[in-house]
Image (spheres, helix red, strand yellow):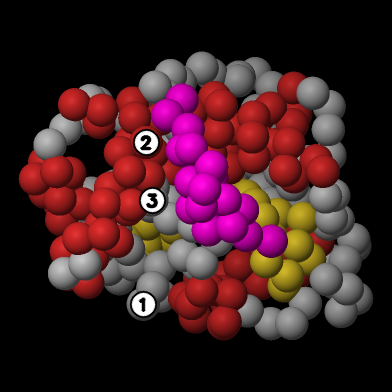
Amino acid sequence: MEPVYVYSFPFAAGSRYSYHPLVQTSPDWLRWIPLDYAGRGRRLFEPPMTVLTDIVTDLKTQILARPKTPFAFYGHSMGSLVAYLVTVELMREQQPLPQHLFLSGRSGACIPERQRHALQMSRAEMVAELQRMDGDLSLLLRNPRQFDRYEQVLRADMAALDSYQYVTISPDQLPMPATVFVGSADTCTPEQAQLWQQEFREPVAVHVLAGGHFFIDSQAEAMIRIMTSDLCQNLLPLAIT
């Protein structure tokens, strides 16, 4: 089989290493290209960005600098939103588009971000926010220096999400198919996830998997089965022979 490339967009405070369970479960022909926001992963010493449009421009530039075809996008939570916004920018600039979008852990783009006022939040408030979203901070809280770095990028990512403003792209919706994953116990409901349909011409498939906001760790095998099935179906003429 010819390779299909999947650019992955991290969730808030995540990095290129955040989707390890998905990468490890994937077949050989599914080639992951992990992306980093500034301030983490291989870009650890760059200052984090606090404006979402700056992050989108930065990631778009990375993708255009190393074209791989055919390709798809995957993002979880914040990563879903960034993947979607990068796709919108690529379409506006008439650049090559992903053949499929895989989005998880976020309501449709039309749902506004809950304003957290991240730059003013105390550390206790940030910890409470993560715990509300099913985040496990037990190891980080035992390592103050590591948590200091984590808090810096998390606060920047939350501030970037605070800056999000939805702009509809109708009637020129995105032309590629989309698959949406949501956890059965996540704060994002299946009905809210279905609102992604507003941004796409083709029917959006929504899959509810057991778990909270970070269901992606325990449901990697189920997600990869769905992703590979969708890619084989939609990219058969292009890549899967």
- Residues in magenta? 33-51
- Asked where in the image residue 179 lies, by quadrant, the reply is bottom right
Residue identifier under label 2: 156
- What's the mark number on residue 199? none
Determine whether the residue tagged by mark 2 lies in a helix, strand or loop.
helix
Query: Which kind of residue does numbered mark 2 sit on?
Result: Ala
Residue 199 picture location, percent across and down: 56, 31
Q: In this view, does 99 lie to the left or right of 81?
A: right
Query: Which kind of residue does numbered mark 3 sit on?
Result: Ala
Q: Distance of mark 3 from mark 1, alpha carbons?
A: 19 Å
Residue identifier under label 3: 13
Q: Distance of mark 2 from mark 3, alpha carbons?
A: 8 Å
Which quadrant: the N terminus? bottom right
Looking at this view, is 152 or 194 the one in front?
A: 152
Depicted 144 relative to depicted 53: above or below: below
State if disc 2 and disc 1 touch (CB < 8 Å).
Answer: no
- What's the mark number on residue 218? 1
